[in-house]
Amino acid sequence: MDYFNVLEIETVIEKTEVVKKSKFITYICKISNKDELEVFLKNNKSDNASHNCYAYKYGFKNAVYGYHNDKEPSGTSGEPLLNIINSKNLTNIAILVVRYFGGVKLGTGNLKRAYCSNAISILTNIVIKKAKLFYKLVIKFNIQDSKQIINCINKINETKDLKLKYDDKKVISTIFIKTKELLKEILFKIEILYEKFDYF
């Protein structure tokens, strides 16, 4: 996979729906590890609810994923939430649906739709960005070489926002490129301080 979709927003998104007297409160959050998942669940699960069902996925090449049905029938809650995540090629995301039972049984089809509808609505209306495989490099070069190097970087850098930090007679910059071969014309004039090949 050459890219994954990730949420742009850093805050928890919440949406409530009532279906045949049962209240479904959906929470969606950007996460990147197990600790963040646990904090998200701790802050939003309700001990008074009938069910706290969720699905999650974080990481890229070796993603960690899972779901929890919290005693709801198989295939009606956690699994379809995870299917939504996978169908949209998302990662670094957690979806929690808190249900307060209203006394009317919904049946498996309606129950599945009730658990999923808020999540689908939220994910349709928020900003999602592509995380692609790049080399992230922090480079240093002499100020007198700035013009040539910056001209080259502007052609190959995958982010439009080029930030430069000046340190004495040196310039430090962070760039994202598809391959280091693109640096060949300026490689002898730069020092690579940091390098990582990953999804950004």
Image (spheres, rainbow, N blue to C red):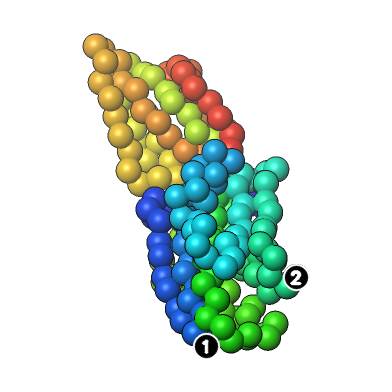
Task: Give coordinates of residue 169: x percent, y percent.
Answer: 26, 12
Label disc, if present, on residue 20 of the rendered structure: 1
Question: The residue under label 1 is which amino acid type?
Answer: Lys
Task: Give coordinates of residue 18: x percent, y percent.
Answer: 46, 81
Residue at 37% over, 53% down: 11
Q: For mark 2, what is the residue? A: 74
- Whether residue 178 appears in this view of the structure is no
Above-or-below relation of 146 to 91: above
Residue at 63% over, 80% down: 111
Above-or-below relation of 144 to 92: above
* Left or right: 127, with 77 as reference point: left
Label disc, if present, on residue 110 of the rendered structure: none
Residue at 34% over, 32% down: 150
Task: Give coordinates of residue 50: x percent, y percent.
Answer: 57, 68
- Whether residue 189 appears in this view of the structure is yes
- The residues bearing labels 2 and 1 have C-alpha atoms spaced at a distance of 20 Å
Task: Give coordinates of residue 62: x percent, y percent.
Answer: 70, 43
